[in-house]
Amino acid sequence: MLIGKRLRERFSLNSNFAFHSCGQQERISLPSITLFGRALHRLGVDFDTIFCDICRPWLRAGWATIYNGKPSVLLGLENIAEEKWHTKAKLKGLISHEIGHLTHMKWREEWETFEKNEEDPLFLLYSEGFAQRCEHLILERESWHMAPNREWLLWCRQNRKFLAKEFLTRLKEQRSVNDFFGSWFDIQGKSQTGYFLGYIFIQELKKSTV
């Protein structure tokens, strides 16, 4: 599989990732000294194992869930390739983000109900913001793996109030907030803005608890 081969080339034997053949999928193990090790140190995660399976026919680039009874990060090759998230920096950001979701599930003790809770738009914003904050903490820098370019973050910062107002308006009117999430939707031509807005939400919550 060409994409899988390229991903292996991105992550050589000296990198933070090890690939193992797994039938129609490919599994990435995260040794304790790498991203999972960083998460252990930075977030204090204590669940046993994370499996990252690269699957072909997916819409999502990443999905934190329970797979074979264990906390797992599943990755979708097609979406990763489409979004050009195949670089080391992008993949590290994506995987760290999904580890953040697993950490959130663990802390809330909601392994079975977390994804259902995300059907609530406000909880979804909170969840994605929390995961984005975890991505930054694990990588120890402001990593925005979903940003297509530098202008995206600048635009989000400049339009922070507009994004918040638009999100709240949709909540009040019980309209879909899908335009804030996913690469196939957008707000004024900018996709994935919900991750930025969610991060700001988390930052404001953090201020209110200090």
Image (spheres, rainbow, N blue to C red):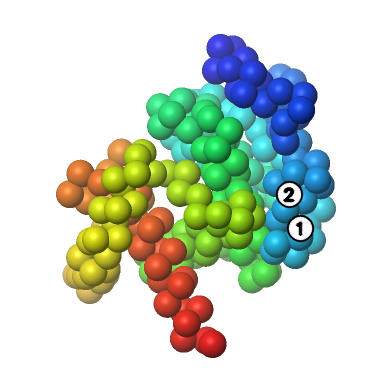
Q: Nearer the viewer, residue 15 or 63?
A: 15
Q: Which residue is mark 2?
A: 36
Q: Residue 105 appears in which quarter of the rendering?
A: bottom right
60 in relation to 209, above or below: above
**In this image, 188 relative to 128: left or right?**
left
Which of 27 and 87 lies nearest the eye of the viewer?
87
Q: Can residue 25 be spotted in the picture?
A: no
**What type is the residue that disc 2 sits on?**
Phe
User: Looking at the picture, how far across and down is residue 198, in whole percent?
Assistant: 41, 64
Specify the quadrant that holds the C terminus: bottom right
Mark 1: amino acid: Leu
Q: Eyeballing the image, is 170 above or below 150?
A: below
Q: Which residue is mark 1?
A: 40
Residue 24 lies left or right of residue 168; in this view the side is: right
How packed mark 1 is, by other alpha carbons closer than 10 Å (few <14, some 14-19, many 20 or more), is some
> Tag on residue 89?
none
Contact between labelled residues 1 and 2, with CB atoms less than 8 Å apart: yes
Residue 158 is drawn in which quadrant? bottom left
Residue sitting at 75 percent across and 44 percent down?
Answer: 34
Residue 93: give x, y in percent of width and height: 55, 45
* Secondary element at tag 1: helix
The image position of residue 186, as x and y in percent, is 25, 46
Secondary element at tag 2: helix
Disc 2 to disc 1, C-alpha distance = 6 Å
Where is the N terminus found, in terms of image quarters?
top right
Q: Position of residue 114 (x, y in %)?
A: 56, 62
Position of residue 89 relative to residue 201, above or below, is: above
